Amino acid sequence: MNINKKGGFFMAKAKPVDVIEWEDRKTKVVLTGVVRKLLEKSVIVDICGTDDATVVSHKRYEIISEGIDAAAVPTKQHPHRRK
């Protein structure tokens, strides 16, 4: 959180390639993703470990790292491919 000029708190908005974390409202599972695009009231996020994307409100996420940090982003592995 950041402090504004009046002494109140506000959430910093994520930027493209920031890694964010949020809780899925349906499953209550915490998800991680990389911001693809910044919108006025939300962000479009590529969900880590999947080929899916979703929209997340600025009110619902926390910035995990600014810019892509390889250690913070889980990699996707094909289920039938050996390491």
Image (tube, rainbow, N blue to C red):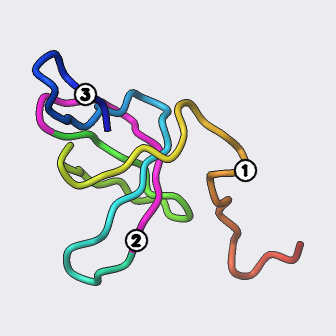
Q: Quadrant of the C terminus?
A: bottom right
Please state the horizontal and vertical placement of residue 53, each as a whole percent of the image: 35, 54
Check disc 3 and give the amino acid type.
Ile
Left or right for 6, reference 74 = left
21 left or right of 56 in image: right
Q: Which class describes the residues within 10 Å of circle 2: few (<14), some (14-19), or many (20+)?
A: few
Nearest the camera: 14 or 80?
A: 14
Label whose residue precedes the other's in the sequence (2 or 3): 3
The picture quadrant where one finds residue 27 is bottom left
Asked if the residues shown at circle 2 and circle 1 are in contact, with their CB atoms under 8 angstroms apart, the answer is no
Residue range in magenta is 30-41
Quarter of the figure that contains the N terminus: top left
Of discs 3 and 1, which sits in the foreground?
Answer: 3
In the visual, does 43 lie left or right of 34?
Answer: left
Q: Which residue is mark 1?
A: 71
How far is the residue under mark 2 from the one under mark 1? Answer: 17 Å
Q: Mark 1 is on which residue type?
A: Ala
Q: Secondary structure at mark 3?
A: strand
Residue at mark 2 to residue at mark 3: CA–CA distance: 26 Å
Helix, strand or loop at mark 2:
strand
Residue behind mark 3: 3
**Label number found at residue 30:** 2
Q: Earlier in the sequence, mark 3 or mark 1?
A: 3
Q: Position of residue 67 (x, y in %)?
A: 56, 30
* Residue 37: in magenta span: yes
User: Please, is residue 53 above or below residue 78 in the view?
Assistant: above
Up/down of 29 relative to 73, above or below = below
Identify the residue at the far front of this view: 7
Labelled disc at residue 59: none
